[in-house]
Image: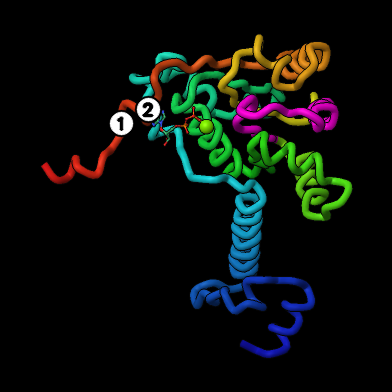
């Protein structure tokens, strides 16, 4: 391609040309050609933004709704899962709290929501509560924590996984301010192995727990997942393949 075109494309940050990704169509001229070129640039920018959103989300794994088996999980129906998968509740700023014993699919559902939302252009962050506490505790001294926290506050959906496995202790006030800041600005998904009656113990303060629940549950869907857990029912063993 003409070097001046490449140089100008670089100047105007026109990626498909400056990075030599655009194959000039032979059959298009005039407006049709310009439209094709702009479409290619728009698609390339959207792909880059989506990859960036996915990186920022920091999902620990890929999960989708299609792989979730509602026959073995009585806490959520196929219809309810379908409503969750539509993601309209994100626009209406609803929260979702998934409660249940280990292995009942809480993280799976949270990740399926997250992955779908990222594809639809949503800014998302996934964190375990443990990691969030670490970020909150180190925000004064760590640039990495500050940056992550800044992203949490910009997000349209914050997923907090495993609330209640460890006590929140000294970071509880900061956690409360984060939730207050996101309240009515973003959706929050929380997974927990403990019902609300155990939350005071987790944050170490019953008044704070009440205030927290007050905000979180104002517009909220609560799902109680049940059972012995998918891992137990579908446990694989080394010797299974040798019989
Ligand atoms: P939890 O977060 O409740 O401890 P997970 O979501 O991590 O449980 O589930 C444990 C494993 O079992 C994951 O690999 C998950 O994909 C799978 N799993 C759990 N429930 C289901 C289900 N109903 N259908 C399909 N896979 C499931
Ligand atoms: Mg989990």
Q: Relative to residue 215, is residue 115 drawn left or right?
A: left
Region in magenta: 157-181
The residue pinned by badge 2 equals: 230
- Residue 159 counted in the magenta span: yes
The residue pinned by badge 1 equals: 234
Q: Are marks 1 and 2 in contact (CB under 8 Å)?
A: yes
* Residue farthest along the right direction in this orientation: 140
- Disc 2 C-beta below 8 A from ligand 1: yes
Q: Nearer the viewer, residue 166 or 140?
A: 166
Task: Label 1, secondary structure: give it.
Answer: loop
Query: Could you tell me which quadrant the N terminus lies in?
Result: bottom right
- Residue 38 counted in the magenta span: no
User: Could you classify mark 1 by the number of other residues whose Cα lies within 10 Å: few (under 14), some (14-19), or many (20 or more)?
Assistant: few
Q: Mark yes or no: residue 26 visible.
A: yes
> Is 76 located above or below residue 88 in the figure?
above
| Total marks in image | 2
């Amino acid at each position: 391609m003409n070097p001046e075109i490449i140089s100008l494309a670089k100047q105007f940050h026109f990626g498909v040309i400056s990075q030599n990704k655009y194959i000039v169509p032979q059959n298009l001229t005039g407006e049709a050609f310009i439209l094709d070129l702009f479409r290619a640039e728009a698609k390339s920018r959207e792909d880059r933004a989506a990859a960036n959103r996915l990186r920022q989300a920091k999902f620990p794994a890929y999960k989708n709704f299609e792989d979730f088996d509602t026959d073995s999980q009585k806490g959520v129906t196929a219809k309810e899962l379908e409503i969750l998968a539509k993601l309209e509740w994100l626009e209406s700023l609803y929260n979702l709290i998934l409660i249940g014993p280990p292995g009942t699919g809480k993280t799976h559902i949270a990740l399926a929501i997250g992955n779908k939302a990222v594809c639809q252009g949503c800014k998302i962050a996934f964190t375990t509560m443990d990691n969030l506490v670490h970020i909150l505790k180190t925000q004064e001294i760590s640039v990495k924590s500050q940056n992550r926290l800044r992203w949490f506050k910009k997000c349209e959906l914050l997923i907090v996984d495993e609330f209640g496995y460890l006590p929140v202790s000294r970071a509880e006030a900061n956690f409360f301010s984060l939730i207050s800041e996101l309240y009515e600005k973003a959706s929050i998904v929380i997974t927990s192995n403990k019902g609300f009656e155990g939350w005071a113990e987790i944050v170490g303060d019953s008044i704070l727990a009440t205030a927290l629940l007050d905000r979180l549950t104002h517009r909220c869907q609560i799902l109680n997942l049940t059972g012995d857990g998918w891992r137990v029912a579908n446990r694989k063993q080394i010797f299974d393949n040798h019989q």
